[in-house]
Structures are given as structure tokens and as C-alpha cells.
Amino acid sequence: MATNAKAKKPKAKAVAVEPGSVDELVRVTLLGFRYEGAPQGALVHDLSKIGLEPARIAELLGAKAATVRQQKAEKRPVWPQKGGPK
């Protein structure tokens, strides 16, 4: 019997990035180009995915670490919106 259930992709393991390194700078800069006007929750999820720790994400975004952990626990907001940023 065929099912309509989608197979879940395995989550990519986050790679630790040294704070203040050139590698971190390049990763964050590239995300900056990609996410002009993006909701903070989307940035939190994607910065986590590239290997940044919640405390460092909070520092970069000017947020509290507790806020970052809460947003990371929630579902990633849809971004980009269809039709481009508003």
C-alpha cells in the first residue's frame, strides 16, 4: 500500500563556529544578504543551522538568550513570503 506520508529529512548537525572568526563573519554576512527584512525567528533557526550557539545568536541579533532559545523551540517562520518582502 502506498502512503502519502512524507519522509522526514535527517536534521543537519550544527558545526560549532568560533565567535569572531572569519568563518563566522562570512556565514553571517551571507545570511544578511539573504534575509533583508526577515523575521527574527527565521534568522534564529538559520543561524543555529550554520553552527552558532544561542548565546552568540542573541549577541549578534541584540536579543536575550532566553528569547533565542524560545524561538529556536518554536517552528521556523515561513520566509521568504510569496511575493517578496513587505
Image: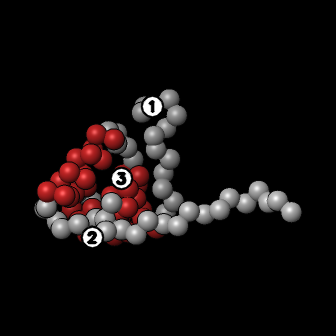
Q: CA distance from mark 2 to mark 3?
A: 17 Å
Residue 38: x %, y % from top left: 37, 43
Residue drawn at point x = 31 percent, y = 65 percent: 51
State which tag comes first along the sequence, 2 or 3: 2
| Residue sticking out furthest to the right | 1
Residue 36 image label: none
The image shows residue 73 at horizontal and vertical percentages of 46, 67
On residue 84, which mark appears? Answer: 1
Determine which residue is flagged by label 3.
43
Q: Is residue 44 visible?
A: no
* Quadrant including the N terminus: bottom right
Nearer-N-terminus badge (2/1): 2
Name which residue lies at 17% across and 53% down: 25
- The number of discs equals 3
- Residue extending furthest toward the front: 1
| Label 1 Cα crowd, 10 Å radius (few <14 / some 14-19 / many 20+) | few
Image quarter (top left, top right, bottom left or bottom right) of the C terminus: top left
Q: Which residue is mark 2?
A: 16
Left-right relation of 79 to 14:
right
- The crowd level at tag 2 (other Cα within 10 Å; few <14, some 14-19, many 20+) is few
Q: CA distance from mark 3 to mark 1?
A: 16 Å
Q: Are marks 2 and 1 in contact (CB under 8 Å)?
A: no
Please, what secondary structure does the residue beneath circle 2 have?
A: loop
Decide: marks 3, 1 in contact (CB < 8 A)? no
Amino acid identity at mark 1 = Gly
